[in-house]
Image (cartoon, rainbow, N blue to C red):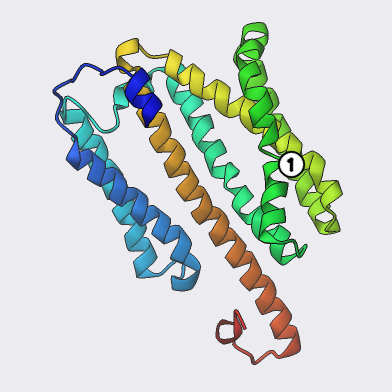
Amino acid sequence: IIFTLIIITKSPKVKEPIDIYGFLSFGFGLFFLTLALMQARSWGWGSLSVIALFILTLVSFILLYLFDKRTKAPFIDFKLFKIPLFSCPLIIYTSISIARMMTVFWVIYFQNILGFSPFLAGIIIAISVFPMIFLSPLTGLFVDKFGIKKPVIFGQFLLIFAFAWLAIFMMQKNIYFLMPGLIIFGVGIVLIMNITYSTAINSVSVAKSAVAASIITTFRNAGSAIGVAILGSTLTNVQFSKFSSTLSQIDPKANPKLLEGL
């Protein structure tokens, strides 16, 4: 607070109306989508409730587009999406935000499967953050030397390798085997997210840079919320399927829904 008051200067005020309708449309759309993904297994993918939520999601995002197309200060400025160097990095950035939420479930794995304490599980997860701390200042140098495309593609291949490594060696239940995958994951994340973010920001005019940054942050948070919903739904569905299969071998007449969680 002290440094903010001393150093940050006052910015000129811009008299633009707040796009309440666009904000509400986006917020409700994201809420409906997340709820549908998280409750689909309990309610059934073909249930009226889930179908209705997906329809409401679609309607909300259509309304968002219509509202923001007609206002002077839209919540999401869709004109920026016509710029390839903004829209393509934004898509990559959002998709990585979704995949990044896998770390939430790693903590559960380290505690429930490997038996680590919450503190130790957090320390292990921090291993994937260390490359972000040390490599972040160097990403600009990578772009200057190799351009934008090569580091981002290399980062994506690193993520694929990291996920494959972790998928294989998590079965070994040995943290030392998991270390390389965690470190490589962190390297891939920092290459992709830092470069795509700066590329998207630099692709627009200075007057639109704040708007662009807001859109990127909004999509990052939306991607994170959707990522938790998708990955959580996948996890519970796989667990329930495995549980039902095992239970049917023990007692074909048992109802897995009544015994789940016991």
Location of residue 107 in the rendering, given as x and y in whole percent from the top left corner: 66, 55
Which residue lies at the image location 27% right of the left edge and 47% below the top edge?
60
**One can see residue 259 in this view:** yes
**Counting other residues with Cα less than 10 Å from the Cα at mark 1, is it few (<14), some (14-19), or many (20 or more)?**
many
In the image, taking residue 110 as reference, residue 204 lies left or right, namely: left
Which residue lies at the image location 58% right of the left edge and 59% below the top edge?
234
Q: Quadrant of residue 66?
A: top left
Front residue of this view, candidates 155 and 255: 155
Which residue lies at the image location 30% right of the left edge and 22% below the top edge?
79
In the image, taking residue 70 as reference, residue 195 lies left or right, namely: right
In the image, taking residue 122 as reference, residue 195 lies left or right, namely: left
**One can see residue 84 in this view:** no
Q: Which residue is mark 1?
A: 182
Location of residue 23 in the rendering, given as x and y in whole percent from the top left corner: 25, 41
Which residue lies at the image location 40% right of the left edge and 60% below the top edge?
35
> Label 1 sits on what residue type?
Leu
In the image, taking residue 157 as reference, residue 30 lies left or right, namely: left
Q: Quadrant of the C terminus?
A: bottom right
201 in relation to 120, above or below: above
* Number of residue marks: 1
Q: Quadrant of residue 259?
A: bottom right
Q: Quadrant of the N terminus?
A: top left
Q: At numbered mark 1, what does the secondary structure look like: helix, strand or loop?
A: helix
Location of residue 191 in the rendering, given as x and y in whole percent from the top left corner: 63, 25
